[in-house]
Image (tube, grey):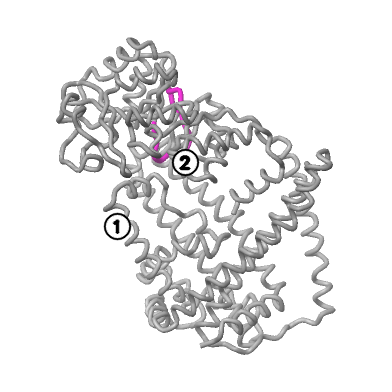
Amino acid sequence: MHKAGQVMRQAVYNIYMYRLDYIQVFALTKLCQFLLIAPMTTIVFKLMLRVTGYTHITQQNIQSFMAHPFVILMIILLIMLVLLFIYYEMGFLFLMAFHQQRGIRYRFLHIWQQLNRKVISFFSIQVIFLIIYIAFLLPLASFIFPLTFTQAMSIPHFLTDEIMSSRSGRLLYTAVAIVLVIVGIRSILALPIFTIQPKISILRSLIQSWRFSKRGLFELLGLLAMLVTVHMLVMLGITIISTLPLYILERLIPSAALVTAGITLAFLEMVFVVLFSMLQAMFSQVMVAVTYYTTAFGKTRFTLKVKKRRYKPLSFIVLVVFIVLSVMNIISLENSVYAPDTKIIAHRGYTTGNVENTISGLVSATSAGADLIEIDIQQTEDGQFVVFHDQTLRRLTGKNGVIANMTLGELKTLTIHANGFNDKISSLDDFIEVAKTLNVSLLIELKVHGKETEDILPKLVEKLKAYKVLDTYYVQSSDPQMMTQLKKLAPNLRVGIVYALNIGLMDETVDFISLEESWVTDQLIAEVKQQKIDLFVWTLNKDQSLQEFIRKNVNGVITDLPDIALNIRKKQNEREYFLQRILNLLQFMF
């Protein structure tokens, strides 16, 4: 087996000697991705909505939407499109690396023809094995291939949060993740084997990859780790060096900071794209070298004179792109939102140091400075409102019991546990009384279990009227019909609908929507603003997500970390330096 240093040197040598080829391949790949794949996906989805008659897709109607024959056909078409894109994108890189390492002359047309000969596999039973292969590889793909089509594929945070909320869920999630990573690594060589060997099937490629990685797994992991580590260190070094002039100018000559910031950001954007592309090329070189034991260094096909002539149009294009990016960044940075008024909403109170949906969590969230406190309520067997999230008691009490089958008095005697803390279950009345004392408003989420009384909404409205909070509180639920009815009963109450999933145009009669972050796009933010509907995004527990949506000035962010969210909003209110804003933007993009 090759030594790591020899494999790395060979990879760097080949990429340098054939750099023009890689520039052309990456340019064509990205053009195809942004000009063909993405627009086609949008067109197909709009066509699905038109044919099925849906305006938008939510968790309530997604099952009936997905069951429509036309939708099934279009989804199969999109899956095939994605698979073909990944196959051609990575296939070109693997075949280029193989020819370069063997010193064999090649033309793009010949590579294209070789890849085309195997496209028939995508229209046979073999495609099932390819889908399984891609599924196993997804946990690694977004990390190893940051600029490929797989980057945006991830599990929505609300699903992982629910899974991770219990010990058994965490163990199951960890076990599944370990299995996926191991199988993904063991199968990682299947695609280069399939693309390089003319007559091998996808299934045989998977088997060969599994057998090979059994003896060479640690070497492969070591090389991948080395690649990623060097890549990150280079990115860090370039970022520090290139931002140093901006750091100095912002403090000595503030008037020059805006232009310098725009140029710096454009430079870093272009450099990062090149670095990520190089990482992808290096990865393909290493995989081919390890799989086929190639040791000979490739030789350049062009003379130095010819290369210089071919660089002239490339230099012009790079200069034009750099100027355009710089101008766009200067305008964007100048018009960036300052002093955002995004509401910080504490999810189920302040759960750090407290149990969720408890009075102590309410008090802690208020002390932290949260603008709103989100709580969950359900109707009990005796028609009262209890503050509790789950339909059963198992997760927080360790006991069997269903909320809808118990009275409020029975529930208030129980002790709930979470993260080493204990507390008592409280009623909605208890919460409102304490919240009024603390002068903080509540965002009440009505959980529907199916055993509610017919007068549940009038009861809730009367309670809020009695406490004189009808005009200052918010009420939301995942039941759209119930919230539409509530809005008619109490026009002054701020009523919203909770969506775990939403795709398509919004046409609501409520005051706000609460949407899981995975489905919030710039287009949707613009649409709800135009319709004068507030947008709350949930549940944001990462600095990057909080910074992104506070920067975009959405109406509210629902988070378990209100103190961190408040600190982020405060920094933006203080008109942070351009340098910090650039670093934030780079973090969002990569």
Q: Is residue 246 above or below residue 319?
A: above
Distance from Cα at disc 1 to Cα at disc 2: 23 Å
The residue range painted magenta reads 498-512
Q: Is residue 225 above or below residue 104?
A: above
SS label for mark 1: helix
Could you tell which of marks 1 and 2 lies nearer the N-terminus? 1
Residue at 49%, 28% in the rendered image: 369
In terms of depth relative to the viewer, which is nearer, 22 or 202?
A: 22
Residue 392 part of the magenta-drawn span:
no
Label annotation for residue 172: 1
Label annotation for residue 540: 2
Residue at 42%, 42% in the rendered image: 51
- Tell me residue 117's x, y (percent): 50, 76
In terms of depth relative to the viewer, which is nearer, 286 or 225?
A: 225
- Tell me residue 118's x, y (percent): 47, 75
In the rendered structure, which amino acid carries the disc numbered 1?
Leu
- Tell me residue 291's x, y (percent): 50, 83
Quadrant including the C terminus: bottom right
Q: Quarter-wise, where is residue 209 in the image?
A: bottom left
In the rendered structure, which amino acid carries the disc numbered 2?
Leu
